[in-house]
Amino acid sequence: MNQTAKIDRPVAEAPRLEVQNLVRRFDGQMVVDDVSFSIPAGQVTCLLGPSGCGKSTTLRIIAGVDMQDAGRIYVDGNLVCDTVFRVPPERRAIGLMFQDFALFPHLSVADNVAFGLKGSKEEKRTRVTELLDRVRLLKHIDNFPHSLSGGEQQRVALARALAPRPRILLMDEPFSGLDERLRDGIRDETLALLKEEGTAVLLVTHEPHEAMRMADQILLMRGGKIVQRGAPYNLYNAPVDRAAAAFFSDINVLKGRVKGALTATPFGDFLTPGHADGAEIDIVIRPQHLKIDFDRAGRGPNPTVQDGTPARGVVERARFMGRESLVEFRMDFDGSILRATVPNVFLPKPGTPMWLMIRRDRCFVFGAKA
């Protein structure tokens, strides 16, 4: 095997990681379908999607522990693998971090972090001490993994992954094994350290909250394909379809049929240009953008420019969720159920009628899927 990597472009102009047209099949089934993306140095990119969508397979191919059926992978402009040429995993300058941490129980914290490091004993000790100090675990340098909490073990695993100064760090659901109360703090600490190191990071997760909190760029994956990519703000506020909107939060769906570029809803007619007459459409709105009109209670509709026609609904049930209350309404218009969130405690009794409004500028219009 030729061990000299090919260079297809000037290295200075190349992203840290570039994936081109990656394809992987298992037993004839497409698992990774023409996936392409790039990550510059210092950027955190999240491969986000439901279980079984192909994101972990993509990660394994990049790491070199699985082989693609088609496509190429470059690191700093250098080809590391296609369907013929392949640099061994240990020579790709790629670090790995998984959800089970995979620490060696018979090695001390220091020896775990030093595992795989090259150089003199003094050089290794200096690097280990530096990283453990940065993750606030220097006092545990001579302890063994079993004596550490889950969060501490995760930070040791992070230090070990970064110790060889990898150009790229691949993280596969690294926080899923942690107590929910610890996750946000550990994520923030991890992100700060990754930014300091300038490492290009590919994070695989099925949790939208984690992706939004950590990523500079999100690649939303479904059925082996990347269906949308961009900054977290853009994916949340401009979803490509109904499923993308629903992946990031709960949604309400107003179903209708187009007639003369308009669609009738409980909140009046919606402009729905670009959809053929007779086409079925879904108008999607998140619960936080469904507003209860407390000032109009019982007085009837009074349309406004921004919010359109108010619609009457009857409370089905209300639940306090901690930071907000979730109220479900059965709409007079068509008997559908809509959900609204209200800050703090708001628990109206079932059967209470109320007028609701929606933020039309916060609605998404999609063609209905069969």
Image (spheres, helix red, strand yellow):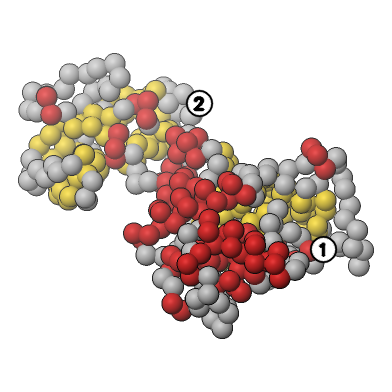
Choose between 340 and 159: the one closer to the eye: 159
Q: Which residue is drawn at 17% across and 50% down?
A: 319
Q: Where does the image place residue 203, in percent across and percent down from the top left?
A: 57, 54
What residue would you read off at disc 2?
274
Q: How crowded is mark 1: few (under 14 residues within 10 Å), some or many (20 or more)?
A: some
Q: How many numbered discs, if any?
A: 2
In-image side of 219 versus 339 (left or right)? right
Q: Where does the image place residue 267, in percent across and percent down from the top left?
A: 26, 28
Mark with earlier residue (1, 2): 1
In-image side of 188 versus 8 (left or right)? left
**Label 1 SS:** loop
In-image side of 175 versus 88 (left or right)? left
Q: Residue at x 61, y 53 (%)?
A: 202
Q: Where does the image place residue 208, in percent across and percent down from the top left?
A: 45, 50
Q: Which residue is drawn at 29% across and 37% down?
A: 288
In-image side of 24 versus 47 (left or right)? right
Q: Is residue 161 visible to the viewer in this orientation of the structure?
A: no
**What amino acid type should be assigned to the residue bearing mark 1?**
Val
Q: Where does the image place residue 131, in percent across and percent down from the top left?
A: 58, 59
Choose between 21 and 311: the one closer to the eye: 21
The answer to which image quadrant residue 363 occupies is top left
Q: Looking at this view, name the residue that lies furthest to the top.
A: 305
What label does residue 243 carry, if any? none
The answer to which image quadrant residue 263 occupies is top left
Give the quadrant of the N terminus: bottom right
Q: Which residue is drawn at 38% across and 60% down?
A: 182
In the figure, 163 relative to 334: above or below? below
Choose between 279 and 73: the one closer to the eye: 73
**What amino acid type should be assigned to the residue bearing mark 2?**
Gly
What residue would you read off at disc 1?
87
